[in-house]
């Protein structure tokens, strides 16, 4: 519990420092709103022109978009240390200062970054979720709320795990931004639509390696009372846990990589 | 067993060379940063660690503070192998990096300290008393509520020191702490370090390029070059070993025509008087003074050691560093 | 420094970062595949008047020349943030021309070196998934000058963004907004051919549509080769307007800086 308190205290302090430049902060937050807004506009235009996508209605598409948007930007909001700042921490030697403190390195990296500008992106995602839920006529129950919360939090862990690939590469001072972007931002672009529209290799990629299908699409399908790709209903509760698995596996790799950290300078 | 035991410490770095024309892959080259360094430090010692850039000073400090895992050798600090039990080890140490900050850039330094309290799990009472004491000793009162980015270099270094001592470490590493500081800041920093060492018996290891730091603070100095330890002992001994030239200036009442200087002594007549330089190993100082005294009535005599920076440069040169 | 050297230096730099380039190509290819798969699935449910083959070509050309649209000159932006730009502005040389050439070199070299290998790979993909040659050779011929005019347009646009950056205290927000406008209205997020028809009438007149949308439509035959002349005129109109606007903004900035004393 102590670690969690430390995390929120750190994040609070970073927020304070962001707000030291209020006009810049507001401007950038608005820019984020427009950005995510136009992403949503694309979905609206697609629904307007095509009406449905395979077996999925427009409402279903908004719901999928909302889940992805909320998960992705929650991760960027709270996990900025991994999703954005880590390569710089290595380059500037800030990672050294974490290593001389009696706390986990990953904990401190996460404590050292937040991106509060993403709050507007999350808001867009929530709006999309609500619209999607309304149009799809989802009848909410306690179990469904629980599964949605599980789906979003596990997706966050998954996304964090995927961004850790880049962190691991940068420990060895290998630049990998573009390649890792393919799976992180690429994963976001691809998996904000239902997974069954893609050909097998892409489906396999997003089920086995970057299992967005398991953390997001299976539970979302269950919430919208859609068939679960032929799987029994209880899987909707279990498959999202794969996000935690990815995160744990990547954390192990991260710590193994830290053994070979060479530090900078001199 | 001493507090710090370092035995045959080795660390290699693989450096990628620039890609040559026509080659697909870059060639790699192994640089031996540390080639088997051994030393031990007792509790409460104040040790200076010097050497030219790239000698392996920072690498040693990084291994000792648990940042780097070495490629060979043994290190034991207070019974702990730093890289094996990193968290347990770093509870007992404080590190100040001269050029990178450990505090938070945009927030008042008091907020940084409060966060450090949580990071090190310092009990509230201990934290308050320690902070009060350090605030007084480092004169931080007036800047406690100022964000780090608005502080001057000297203030920043004092703030950093406070941050790295809040948890009462037994061992403090300082990586070029006086770099870029003005004379007043340097002096007050040195006073503080002496105080900390005396008051709490904190073991301090200090890397620096500033010989005055060493002269003012350190009872013991280690010289590192090419990844090897080249000297370990008192600063005075080091100077004696390489201090081949001394300067004396003399002023006589009236003329000193009877002065006959032995061979090997260089001299220069200036308006202030006579400037002599000699090699004390060939001509003992007492003998020279005798000769000077016989020549006339001395009004003023100053014996000056050669500037330490020059000495170190001479030593590096002699050791081919 | 002559404008030619700027291009040569840029080429050398691009070659130095081959690793990043290959990574970028693979990433862009991946995005292309995902988008084509999405549009194919959408078309399977409800075919549109624009054939799917053309949508695939649209996606691939957008991905291939993606680099052309990204704000490229981070060095210049750093210069503005640090205030060093004022030295440049006070030089007697025409700095707009100098930076225009620099930006163009970056965009041309950066995008060509990525576009060529990407398009080769996209040609290998089956029809309807990848890129195929246009029905008439004239379309290809008509697209090349349009692409060049589009390049002139995008460089002028970026110069305006840079001029904006110099005015506002915080460049990131403004830059983000302008980049986003570009991505949306140039057809990168969604092919402009799939926007509602009534919107298309307006959007295709905007400068952003001149960069890639116009050349792509000439290539796929959506604009008949006979329309090429009309397209060129519109593009040239925007080139002149945007350069004019850019130059006047740069001059205004320059005056302001000189008044402030650097």
Image (cartoon, coloured by chain):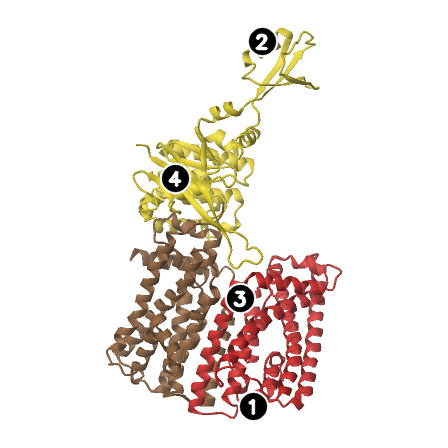
Chain colours: A brown, B yellow, C red
Tags 2 and 4 touching, CB below 8 Å = no
Q: Tag count in the figure?
A: 4
Please give the chain letter of the residue carrying mark 2: B
Sequence-first tag of 2 and 4: 4
Please state the chain letter of the residue tagged with numbered disc 4 in the rendered image.
Answer: B
**Same subunit under labels 3 and 1?**
yes
Q: Are marks 4 and 1 on the same chain?
A: no
| Proximity of marks 2 and 1: CB atoms separated by less than 8 Å | no
**Residue C259 visible in the displayed image:** yes
Return the chain for callout 1: C
The residue tagged 2 is: B290
Tell me, for residue B9, which label it has, or none.
Answer: 4
Q: Quadrant of the N terminus of chain B?
A: top left
In the image, is residue C260 above or below residue B102? below
Quick check: do tags 3 and 4 share a chain? no
Which mark, residue C215? none
> Residue B149: image x %, image y %?
51, 51
Q: Which mark is nearer the camera, 2 or 3?
A: 3
Residue C149 percent location from the top left of the image:
67, 78
| Vertical position of residue B144 compared to residue A127: above or below | above
Nearer to us: label 2 or label 4: 4
Q: Which residue is mark 3?
A: C21
User: Left of C53 or right of it: where is A159?
Assistant: left
Residue at the (63%, 63%) spot, across then down: C10
Q: Residue at x 56, y 55 (%)?
A: B20
- Crowdedness near tag 2: few (<14), some (14–19) or many (≥20) residues, C-alpha within 10 Å: few
Quarter-of-image position of residue A119:
bottom left
Q: Are marks 2 and 1 on the same chain?
A: no
Residue at the disc numbered 1: C198
Distance of label 2 from label 3 (alpha carbons): 78 Å
């Amino acid at each position: 519990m102590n670690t969690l308190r430390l995390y929120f205290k750190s994040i609070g302090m970073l927020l304070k420092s962001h707000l030291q430049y209020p006009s810049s902060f507001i401007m950038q937050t608005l820019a984020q709103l427009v950005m995510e807004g136009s992403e949503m506009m694309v979905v609206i235009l697609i629904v307007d022109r095509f009406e449905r996508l395979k077996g999925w209605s427009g409402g279903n598409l908004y719901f999928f978009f909302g889940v992805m948007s909320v998960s992705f930007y929650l991760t960027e909001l709270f996990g900025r240390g991994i999703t954005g700042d880590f390569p710089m921490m290595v380059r500037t030697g800030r990672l050294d200062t974490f290593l001389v403190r009696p706390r986990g390195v990953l904990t401190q990296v996460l404590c050292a970054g937040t991106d509060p500008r993403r709050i507007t992106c999350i808001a867009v995602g929530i709006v999309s979720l609500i619209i999607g839920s309304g149009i799809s006529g989802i009848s909410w129950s306690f179990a469904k709320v629980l599964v949605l919360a599980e789906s979003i939090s596990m997706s966050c862990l998954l996304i964090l795990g995927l961004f850790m690939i880049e962190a691991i590469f940068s420990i060895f001072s290998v630049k990998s931004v573009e390649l890792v972007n393919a799976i992180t931002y690429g994963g976001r672009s691809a998996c904000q639509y239902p997974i069954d529209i893609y050909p097998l290799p892409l489906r396999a990629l997003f089920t086995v390696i970057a299992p967005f299908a398991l953390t997001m699409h299976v539970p979302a399908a269950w919430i919208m009372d859609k068939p679960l790709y032929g799987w029994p209903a209880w899987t909707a509760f279990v498959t999202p846990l794969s996000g935690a698995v990815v995160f744990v596996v990547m954390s192990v790799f991260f710590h193994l990589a830290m053994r070979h950290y060479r530090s900078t300078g001199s | 067993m001493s507090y710090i035991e370092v035995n045959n410490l080795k660390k290699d770095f693989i450096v990628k060379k620039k890609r040559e024309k026509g080659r697909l892959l870059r060639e790699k080259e192994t640089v031996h940063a540390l080639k088997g360094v051994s030393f031990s430090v007792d509790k409460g010692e104040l040790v200076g660690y010097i050497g030219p850039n790239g000698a392996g000073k920072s690498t040693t400090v990084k291994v000792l503070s648990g940042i780097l895992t070495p490629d060979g050798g043994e290190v034991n600090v207070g019974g702990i192998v730093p890289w094996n039990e990193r968290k347990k080890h770093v509870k007992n140490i404080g590190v100040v990096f001269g050029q990178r900050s450990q505090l938070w850039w945009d927030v008042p330094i008091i907020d940084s300290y409060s966060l450090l309290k949580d990071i090190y799990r310092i009990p509230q009472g201990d934290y308050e008393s320690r902070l009060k004491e350090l605030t007084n000793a480092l004169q931080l009162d007036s800047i406690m509520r100022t964000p780090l980015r608005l502080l001057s270099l000297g203030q920043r270094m004092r703030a950093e020191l406070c941050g790295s001592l809040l948890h009462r470490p037994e061992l403090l590493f300082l990586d070029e702490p006086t770099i870029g500081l003005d004379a007043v800041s340097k002096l007050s920093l040195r006073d503080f370090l002496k105080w900390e060492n005396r008051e709490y018996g904190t073991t301090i290891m200090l890397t620096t390029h500033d010989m005055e730091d060493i002269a003012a603070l350190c009872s013991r100095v280690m010289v590192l070059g090419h990844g090897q330890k080249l000297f370990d002992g008192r600063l005075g001994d080091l100077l004696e070993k390489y201090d081949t030239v001394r300067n004396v200036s003399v002023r006589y009442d009236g003329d000193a025509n009877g002065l006959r200087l032995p061979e090997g002594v260089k001299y220069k007549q200036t308006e202030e008087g006579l400037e002599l330089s000699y090699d004390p190993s060939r001509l003992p100082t007492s003998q020279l003074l005798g000769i000077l005294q016989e020549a006339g009535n001395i009004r003023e005599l100053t014996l000056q050691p050669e500037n330490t920076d020059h000495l170190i440069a001479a030593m590096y040169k002699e050791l081919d560093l | 420094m002559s404008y030619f050297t700027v291009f040569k230096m840029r080429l050398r730099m691009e070659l130095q970062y081959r690793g990043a380039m290959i990574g970028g190509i693979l990433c862009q290819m991946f995005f292309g595949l995902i988008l084509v798969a999405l549009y194919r699935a959408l078309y399977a449910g409800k075919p549109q008047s624009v054939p799917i083959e053309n949508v695939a070509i649209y996606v691939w050309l957008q991905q291939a020349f993606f680099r052309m649209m990204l704000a490229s000159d981070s060095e210049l932006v750093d210069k503005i943030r640090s205030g060093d730009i004022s030295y440049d502005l006070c030089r007697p040389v025409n700095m707009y021309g100098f930076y225009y050439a620099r930006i163009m070199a970056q965009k041309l070299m950066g995008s060509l070196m990525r576009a060529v290998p990407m398009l080769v790979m996209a040609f290998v993909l089956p029809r309807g998934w990848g890129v195929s040659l246009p029905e008439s050779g004239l379309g290809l011929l008509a697209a090349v000058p349009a692409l060049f005019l589009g390049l002139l347009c995008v460089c002028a646009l970026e110069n305006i963004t840079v001029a904006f950056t110099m005015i506002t205290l915080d460049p990131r927000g403004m830059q983000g907004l302008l980049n986003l406008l570009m991505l949306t209205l140039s057809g990168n997020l969604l092919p402009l051919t799939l926007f509602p028809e009534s919107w298309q009438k307006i959007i295709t007149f905007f400068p952003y549509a001149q960069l890639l949308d116009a050349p792509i439509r000439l290539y796929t035959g959506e604009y008949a080769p006979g329309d090429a002349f009309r397209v060129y005129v519109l593009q040239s109109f925007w080139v002149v307007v945007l350069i004019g606007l850019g130059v006047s903004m740069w001059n205004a900035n320059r005056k302001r800086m000189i008044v402030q004393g650097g």
